[in-house]
Image: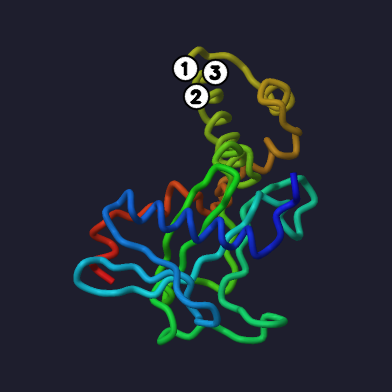
Amino acid sequence: MRKSNEMQIGKAGEYLVCADLAIMGLIGFQSEQGLPYDILIDTGDKILRCQVKTTQKARKCPQREVDTRVYSFNVKRHGRGGLKRYELNEIDLFALVELETKQVVYIKNADMPATINLRVESLRGSYYDEKGSSDFLKLKKEIKFCESQKIKWTQTGMAKLLGLHVAQINRMLKPDFKPFQSKARYFSELKKDLGWFHGL
């Protein structure tokens, strides 16, 4: 099977967006080449201009020592060398498409950052900040159980029980400790309904 090139990947994303819009009861059709938008969306009372960004698969997240995979989109720039920026008066929204599990999400142009990384649903709970929060809750639960049963516990014992380092347990037990919370999102958290399009 011939490997898909960049244009084929882009076209696949556009077709998937049109199908996704049709399922919601909207009409989406591809625009002419050379325009800043790829899809025109007919909501019944207005026409919206949509730029589609497509990624074929999740990639290792930049600047991470561990193997963390995300769907990465470089959104705001286009043209040769990425020298041009999409302006607010050029397009109304972006559609982000990942072809691995065929998911589509929509974000208003005004709300879109220059780059965005969306997490892989099958890896939910394994990302560093998620695991840290989960480990902290497990530690609190174990300590509460031990105290209710008047069982003596140690940091070393808790570390072995939870599969963590003693230093991690020590850090979590400090009074001012708060688990790190990132602003990272999943496709499923950005889904839009029909009313969202009519409100644009």
Q: Nearer the viewer, residue 70 or 169?
A: 70
Query: Label 3 near label 2: C-beta < 8 Å?
Result: yes
> Which residue is identified by label 1?
148
Q: Label 2 sits on what residue type?
A: Lys
Does the residue at mark 1 contact the one at mark 3 (Cβ under 8 Å)? yes
Query: Which quadrant does the N terminus fall into?
Result: top right
Viewed as shown, does residue 167 lie left or right of 162?
Answer: right
Q: Position of residue 100 (x, y in %)?
A: 60, 44
Taking the spot 55% from the left edge, 42% from the top edge, the residue there is 101
Q: Residue drawn 64% across and 52% down? A: 56
Label 2 to label 3: alpha-carbon separation: 6 Å
Q: Give, as a three-letter code, the residue at label 3.
A: Cys
The residue carrying pointer 3 sits among few (fewer than 14), some (14 to 19) or many (20 or more) residues within 10 Å by Cα, namely: few
The kind of secondary structure element at disc 3 is: helix
Label number found at residue 146: 3
Query: Do the numbered discs 1 and 2 sit on residues whose CB atoms are within 8 Å?
Result: yes
Determine which of the numbered discs, if any, sits on residue 144 in the image.
Answer: 2
Q: Is residue 71 above or below residue 87?
A: above
Kind of residue at badge 1: Ser
